[in-house]
Amino acid sequence: MKKIFYIVPVLLLMLFSSCEDKLDINQNPVQPVTTSSNLMLPGIQGNMAYHLYSHARFSTYHSFYLTSRYGTKSMEDRWDYNQITRMGAWRWHYFDVGSNAVGLIERAKEEGSKNYEGVGKIMLAYSYLTATDSFGDMPVLEAYTGDFSPSYDTQNVVYAEIGKLLEDGIQDLQNVGDGAKTMNAASDLIYQGDLSKWVAFAHAIKAKMRLRTANFDNGYDAVLNEVNSALANWKDAIYYYSNNPQRDWERNMWGPSTPNPQWNFADITNYLTYSVPTDFFINYMTVNGNNIKYDPRLYKLTTPGKKNTYNGAKASEGLNGLTMDDFPNLYNGFWTADNSPLPYVLKEELYFIKAEASFYKGNKGDAYDAYKAGILENLNRLNVSQDSIANYMASDKVKKSSATLEISDIMMQKYIALYLQPETWVDMRRYQYKGYAYPGIYYPKNVLSEFGGKWIQRFPYDPQTEYIYNPQEIERLGASARDWVTRKFWWEENSQL
């Protein structure tokens, strides 16, 4: 099915623009006053896919999937965000997903369309979670009130409001009246109007959110309840791009065409042309046993380079005498083609969440079963042959019993399954980049020395909005400091992992 990436304001302009012979000077003839909820939702869903990409564009380098060929790139190699002029990930939440989701919720209330109201709240919650886990404190209570200088709420308050949105969204979906606008495949590009799947997705978001704090608020039971509720009626939440894309907005932003549509105000086109896998990634993908050299997913996530070799470079250190021909090609892998889908949440992630929560609850049997299920789900998703799956599952890379299962087994398999997703950076920060969860991880050599060995924890706020229109909040938070990106979040400071 062909899916088009809509930008809501442009869509509305095309649908409703008109001119009359006589113009009312009190009414803008080309600015629509409103539109129906079924026409608004597709654009929000496309914007959410771009929002996720806008976080992953940089976090994949901080998560040791990729490193630049040069070793000198400001953000990717040195974690130096001090000179940036724009931060698109901030704006994709507030302007492109959030403002349109708020508009959808309001319009759906007027229509009596509880289905669209509920989905709008769930989408807004997911956008908030994605944003706060990259930025930390942010406006939520005073957001969308018309105030250009809203107060920043602490992250625990943001989390509480996300929880309320999800609960309200679920309630709405369970109380849809006969007069609601029809939701179908044309208006819902994720679940084609199946509200039971949206409820499951809401539980998945709650599971992800609760996992951040479970280690210090005794929340693993809640995590398991949410993830089991999601798995009971799960369908993968994936945004599909056109099978035969012709225009930039029809293409996955990770693709080799490096889409740079005119509305891409932040100019965050992918940098895969000048990037290679890290040695951390390649080392874990190396098996060297059971008649296989590499994890078979390596051949699905990447494509062969000119020399058909699979080297990895040390993060931030460049190619060190090798050439790009010595590395696999990052384009045209399962997630990096122009027509690749872009995942919101996948079933394997839920299995690994269940495995981690069960592990810390001391139920290693359930942890082991979920761990294996997550690996198999990902291998099958990537269309690995059944013979290769059997060989891999029999290799030393996969533990053979619950008695030998370690948290690193769970986290590293999740790391591979969530290739290029921003959630991996959340996981690494939850564990503070510790080797017992991520064996072989190391502090990059070319990070700014002024950080004094501190790890990167966050993105800076958008300089074109926050540092201009909300300077008092920036000053209060200390967000102008050169080491701001190393300041820990609330859930990191309280972490007992």
Image (cartoon, rainbow, N blue to C red):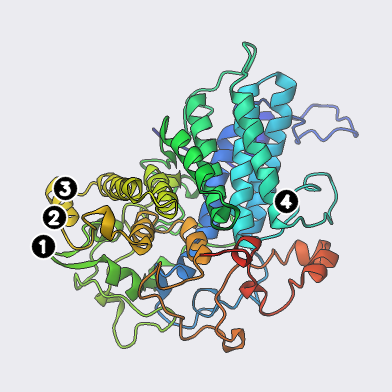
Q: Earlier in the sequence, mark 2 or mark 3?
A: 3
Residue type highlighted by circle 3: Ser
In contact (CB < 8 Å): disc 2 and disc 4: no
Residue 21 visible in the picture? yes
In the picture, the quarter occupied by the N terminus is top left
Residue 205 position in % (x across, y down): 54, 43
Look at the numbered discs 2 and 3 and tell me whether their residues touch, using CB distance below 8 Å: no
Q: Which residue is mark 3?
A: 385
The residue at the far right in this view is 26
Q: Gap between marks 1 and 3, in whole Å?
A: 16 Å
Which quadrant of the structure image shows residue 81?
bottom right
Q: Using residue 35 as the reference point, say whether residue 70 is left or right of it.
A: left
Label 1 crowd bin: few (<14), some (14–19), many (20+), radius 10 Å: few
Of mark 2 and mark 4, the one earlier in the sequence is 4
Classify mark 4: residues with Cα within 10 Å, few (<14), some (14-19) or many (20+). Answer: some
Q: In 3D space, how far apart are the residues under numbered discs 4 and 1 (Cα atoms)?
A: 50 Å
Residue picked out by circle 1? 290
Q: Looking at the rendered structure, which numbered label has been put on residue 157? A: 4
Relative vertical location of residue 197 with respect to residue 223 in this rendering, above or below: above
Look at the numbered discs 4 and 3 and tell me whether their residues touch, using CB distance below 8 Å.
no
Which element carries disc 1, helix, strand or loop?
A: loop
Mark 4 or 3, nearer chain start: 4
Instruction: For marks 2 and 4, give the CA distance.
Output: 47 Å
Query: What residue type is disc 4 on?
Result: Val
Residue 166 in the image: x percent, y percent? 62, 37
Provide the secondary structure element on which disc 4 rests: helix
Q: Is residue 40 visible?
A: no
Callout 1 amino acid = Asn
- The answer to which of marks 1 and 3 sits earlier in the sequence is 1
Query: In this rendering, is residue 465 above or below 112?
Result: below
Residue 414, position as x, y percentages in the image:
37, 56
